[in-house]
Image: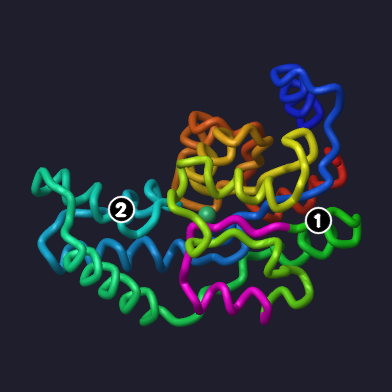
Amino acid sequence: MFSSSIQKYITDNNFATFTAKAIFFDMDGVLFDSMKFHAPAWTKAMNDIGIAFTEYEGYMNEGRTGHSTIDLAFNREHGRNATEAEKQEIYRLKSRYFETYGDSPVMPFASDLLQKVKAEKREIYLVTGSGQASLLDGLQVHFPGIFKKERMVTAFDVTHGKPHPEPYLQALKKSGLTPAEVMVVENAPLGVESAKAAGLFVIAVNTGPFDEKVLWDSGADIVLSSMQELYEKWDFFL
Ligand code: MG
């Protein structure tokens, strides 16, 4: 199944070959089991100011910048974008709720997979829309020696969040590699869209509440049920 997905990617893009020299990892919902905190934090913050917003929407909008998510909800509720002051207030509320949940657990098998990829001498990149300091700092604590600053793209590096291709295009530029040399691990529909818009091969791990069809429809080349499944099948397709 995996080899046929890769073969299809090679054929569709007219590549001569495909070798994954680097793996681009998303953070929330891939390395940290943090979406179960982000999603309700968004719901509570929006509800506090009288805007309807479900946790499922929180999952569906994962990857957007905070401001973009707020504008989306404001346009639906009020037919306009939020003001700067409103954005700051809602984002402050959201971050405060997020912090009340405590530290996000490391996603099971994330560390095992990163160690395996490192041992295979493939480069490891982080490509996240997050600017959450507690999680970014946590990378060095929970995955010591894995992530290097020059191989990270975060909310602070981009103008456009996912689903825009900018985050993945920036990582590609930093790596100096071509789309025939990179594999992406994502969990969110908009994250998959972003990576596909950048022309990359995407493995989606369904760690959220979605029917897997949602991830196939967003363009994923492979959809797996968990990071554990990806870890256990890694050797079969690379
Ligand atoms: Mg994610």
Q: Position of residue 134 (x, y in %)?
A: 51, 79
Q: Residue 89, which numbered label?
A: none
| Residues packed near mark 1 inside 10 Å, few (<14), some (14 to 19) or many (20 plus) | some
Q: Mark 1 points at which residue?
A: 123
Residue type indicated by callout 1: Glu
Give the residue at mark 2.
Answer: 69
How many discs appear? Answer: 2
Q: Which residue is drawn at 48% across and 52% down?
A: 208
Q: Position of residue 44 (x, y in %)?
A: 24, 67
Query: Residues in magenta?
Result: 125-141
Q: Is residue 139 shown in magenta?
A: yes
The residue at the far right in this view is: 120
Q: How far apart are marks 2 and 1 (CA)?
A: 31 Å
Q: What amino acid is labelled 2 in the image? A: Thr
Q: Which residue lies at the image location 37% right of the left edge and 49% below the top edge?
A: 61
- Quadrant where the N terminus lies? top right
User: Disc 1 on helix, strand or loop?
Assistant: strand
Q: Does the magenta stretch include residue 228?
A: no
**107 versus 70 height, above or below:** below
Q: Earlier in the sequence, mark 2 or mark 1?
A: 2
